[in-house]
């Protein structure tokens, strides 16, 4: 369904009310970025498969030490509620009754087959601005993973490109090694 144009800017609270009022439906693939309701691309087969692989990898290794959240909103300020593909959250006894905030996030992952520029130029800087310690951009078209760390001044100071045959050790999980091939499929 094509989203009818909505003129922002909106706060996260107003954006959530749009859903409660039925203006935005559960099946609308949208996120709030910079106060604007942004329509997300449909999820293709390769994208979905990659997200399932990531979910499985993390579930096997981190189930007791992190909350694995898939394609759910995170609130990153008054006007930002993106929906990363995979988010690893700090464990909490209350199981997050409200959407997680930046300080709850250990790792955020965007999977892109057609949205690489948007994820790289809009979403990664947003994650850096709010201090998320690590972000991955899985670029399916180029068959590589961009690993971003050390958020400072709206960007990541450390950016490493990982290609097939190489591995990644998540910053907060030094006992886990992820093969790029296992992520890329």
Image (cartoon, helix red, strand yellow):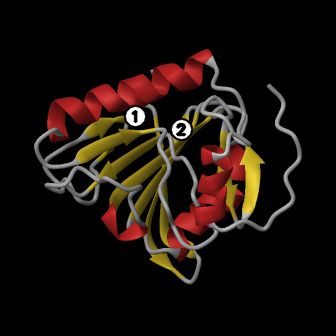
At 29% from the left and 26% from the top, the residue drawn is 56
At 43% from the left and 52% from the top, the residue drawn is 108
Above or below, 30 against 14 in this view is above
Numbered label tally: 2
Q: Specify the farthest residue to the front.
A: 21
Return the x and y of residue 59 as percentages of the image width and height: 22, 32
Mark number for residue 180? 1
Is 172 or 9 nearer to us in this picture? Answer: 9
Q: Is residue 64 left or right of residue 145?
A: left
Asked whether disc 2 touches disc 1, contact meaning CB atoms under 8 Å apart, the reply is yes
Q: Which residue is mark 2?
A: 144
**Considering the image in quadrants, where does the N terminus appear?**
top right
Mark number for residue 164? none
The quarter holding residue 105 reads: bottom left
Q: Specify the farthest residue to the top.
A: 45
Determine the CA span between mark 2 and mark 1. Answer: 7 Å
Above or below, 14 against 68 in this view is below
At 32% from the left and 49% from the top, the residue drawn is 88
């Amino acid at each position: 369904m094509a989203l009818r144009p909505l003129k922002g800017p909106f706060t996260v609270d107003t954006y959530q009310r749009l859903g409660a009022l039925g203006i935005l439906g559960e099946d609308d693939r949208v996120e709030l970025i910079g106060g604007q309701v942004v329509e997300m691309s449909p999820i293709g087969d390769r994208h979905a498969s990659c997200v399932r692989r990531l979910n499985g990898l993390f579930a096997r290794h981190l189930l007791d030490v992190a909350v694995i959240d898939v394609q759910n909103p995170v609130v990153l300020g008054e006007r930002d509620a993106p929906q990363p593909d995979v988010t690893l959250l700090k464990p909490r006894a209350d199981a997050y009754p409200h959407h997680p905030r930046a300080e709850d996030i250990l790792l955020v992952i965007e999977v892109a087959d057609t949205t690489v520029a948007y994820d790289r130029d809009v979403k990664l800087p947003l994650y850096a601005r709010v201090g998320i310690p690590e972000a991955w951009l899985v670029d399916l078209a180029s068959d590589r993973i961009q690993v971003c760390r050390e958020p400072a001044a709206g960007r990541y100071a450390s950016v490493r490109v990982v290609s097939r045959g190489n591995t990644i050790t998540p910053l907060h999980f030094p006992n886990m090694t992820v093969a790029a091939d296992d992520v890329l499929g």
